[in-house]
């Protein structure tokens, strides 16, 4: 039957229900229990013959003459219902005959066990709460298109409890992190999403227009510069679960709108942030009751502490056999091309070289040669200063910055600095970034004069940390695409 015919049939049932004097879209239903509660206390409820009122979506329906069996699901549970003409009123049994899988119903009844041992609700009264006009997909045979699952997430959630549970896991993960940071005395804050100047990361922003002030505004690419202002203002530690936006491509690890946890703590450095990062990930793993050895991205990952710490230049030398600090741009380009030859991306890379500076070439070498080998959680420490404009110069090597990135199963999970707090040095770094912009590197950062002014009032030594919450959710739910941990990921427009 075509979708148009199904809708027409269901709309006809809506008219029939109204003709019975019933509202197919009533205002409320008073539940006494959720299904998970009934399941947990079923024997006692059956023994006491408690009157139950449950509500949920009718997932299946099986008619056997004067008897009807069905399965009703709410947010966390599913239970069988039994409707019998000898128990229900004539009107209620007539209504039951007009029900279709997908309808949202309320039932009153009592708990009992069928001859096959199934926990069931013997229904004494049934109410239609919402008529479903479209057929539900079959979980196993009719809903395998991943893009359709992501585009119609509401429908995916209806038919797959595991997906609902995945997002409950994500929510629990955030609660665990909040609890840990709150226990350390950090203050959760909110900073502007619309910003007159964007900064805190290498990224292209989304641009919008503020009509009242007749000026362009930017969706933030990071929370960093505003959070540092709060450290300057006197808070010892602040954190934010921020929605950030970067005008970049879509792939299994990137979505243009994403959630980033940023933490800043006065009087600490990147070594302290390593300890904090280990503590956050370990607290989440333990809170979710997951083992130390996990499988992610088809690789076994040993999450036991402490995690590895490896200098970036040492890793590049080990895997790429290259000293990136002394190598020329031509040598860096050749190394990147050699890596890309095996992935048939060399022609595309050659086209990009005209817009890529030394900073990005070093990053490309690292990503091509080193990153895939970092399966066990590894803190890659001590980055070249040229690619870390907001980090303090390394205390023992002026060519490096006190920065780390965390990698797990070859994926970047966190970024941290001993934050730069010298306003003169910060201005110089911003000016170097502006020179890069003049050379065509559009992701380079712009000068934020207000932030520099704030720094001149004095920012204490500070450790900063950013953790990609979406990627963390991927790790702890065992999923391979960022779209699987976002309720509504960004997708290309539907084709007619």
Image (cartoon, helix red, strand yellow):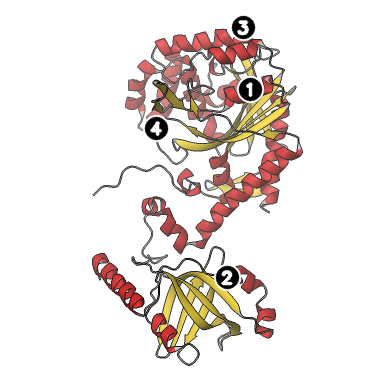
| Residue marked by disc 3 | 424
Measured along the vertical axis of the image, is residue 15 above or below residue 232? below
| Residue marked by disc 4 | 342
Q: Nearer the viewer, residue 373 or 206?
A: 206
Indicate left or right for 322 with 41 as reference: left
User: Which badge, 4 or 1, is on the more N-terminal residue?
Assistant: 1
CB atoms of marks 3 and 4 within 8 Å? no
Percent of width and height locating residue 183? 76, 39
Percent of width and height locating residue 205? 43, 26
Measured along the vertical axis of the image, is residue 246 above or below residue 173? above
- Residue 228, which numbered label? 1
Q: Nearer the viewer, residue 282 or 423?
A: 423
Measured along the vertical axis of the image, is residue 21 above or below residue 159? below
User: Which badge, 2 or 4, is on the more N-terminal residue?
Assistant: 2
Q: Residues within 10 Å of mark 2 (few under 14, many from 20)?
A: few
Q: How crowded is mark 3: few (under 14 residues within 10 Å), some or many (20 or more)?
A: few
- Residue 31, which numbered label? 2
């Amino acid at each position: 039957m075509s979708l148009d015919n199904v809708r027409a049939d269901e709309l006809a049932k809506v008219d029939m229900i109204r003709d019975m004097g019933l509202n197919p879209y009533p205002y409320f239903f008073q539940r006494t229990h959720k299904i998970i509660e009934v399941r947990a206390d079923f024997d006692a409820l059956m023994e006491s013959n408690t009157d139950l009122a449950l509500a949920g979506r009718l997932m299946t329906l099986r008619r056997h003459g004067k008897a009807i069996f069905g399965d009703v699901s709410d947010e966390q549970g599913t239970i069988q219902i039994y409707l019998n003409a000898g128990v229900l009123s004539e009107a209620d049994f007539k209504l039951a005959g007009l029900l279709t899988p997908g309808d949202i119903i309320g039932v009153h009844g009592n708990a009992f066990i069928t001859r096959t041992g199934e926990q069931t609700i013997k229904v004494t009264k049934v109410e239609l709460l919402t008529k479903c006009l479209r057929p539900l997909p079959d979980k196993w045979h009719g809903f395998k298109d991943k893009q359709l699952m992501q585009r119609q997430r509401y429908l995916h959630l209806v038919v797959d409890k595991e997906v609902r549970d995945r997002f409950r896991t994500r929510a629990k993960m955030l609660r665990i992190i909040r609890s840990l940071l709150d226990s350390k005395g950090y203050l959760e804050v909110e900073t502007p999403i619309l910003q007159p100047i964007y900064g805190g990361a290498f990224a292209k922003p989304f641009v919008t227009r503020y009509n009242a002030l007749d000026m362009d505004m930017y969706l933030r690419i990071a929370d960093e510069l505003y959070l540092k202002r709060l450290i300057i203002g006197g808070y010892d530690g602040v954190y934010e679960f921020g929605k950030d936006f970067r005008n970049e491509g879509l792939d299994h690890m990137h979505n243009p709108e994403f959630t980033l946890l940023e933490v800043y703590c006065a009087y600490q450095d990147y070594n302290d942030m390593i300890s904090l990062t280990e503590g956050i990930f370990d607290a989440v793993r333990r809170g979710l009751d997951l083992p130390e050895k996990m499988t992610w991205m088809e690789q076994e990952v040993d999450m036991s502490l402490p995690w590895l710490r490896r200098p970036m230049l040492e890793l590049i030398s080990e895997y790429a056999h290259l000293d990136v600090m002394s190598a020329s741009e031509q040598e860096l380009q050749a190394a990147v091309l050699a890596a890309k030859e095996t992935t048939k991306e060399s022609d595309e890379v050659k086209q990009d070289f005209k817009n890529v500076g030394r900073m990005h070439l070093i990053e490309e070498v690292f990503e091509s040669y080193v990153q895939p080998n970092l399966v066990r959680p590894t803190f890659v420490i001590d980055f070249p200063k040229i690619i870390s404009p907001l980090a303090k110069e390394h205390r023992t090597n002026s060519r490096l910055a006190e920065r780390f990135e965390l990698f797990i199963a070859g994926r970047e999970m966190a970024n941290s600095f001993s934050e730069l707090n010298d306003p003169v040095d910060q201005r110089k770094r911003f000016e170097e970034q502006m020179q890069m912009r003049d050379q065509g590197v559009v992701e380079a950062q712009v000068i934020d004069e207000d932030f520099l002014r704030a720094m001149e009032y004095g920012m204490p030594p500070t450790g900063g940390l950013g953790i990609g919450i979406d990627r963390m959710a991927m790790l702890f739910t065992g999923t391979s695409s960022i779209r699987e941990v976002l309720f509504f990921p960004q997708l290309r427009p539907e084709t007619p």
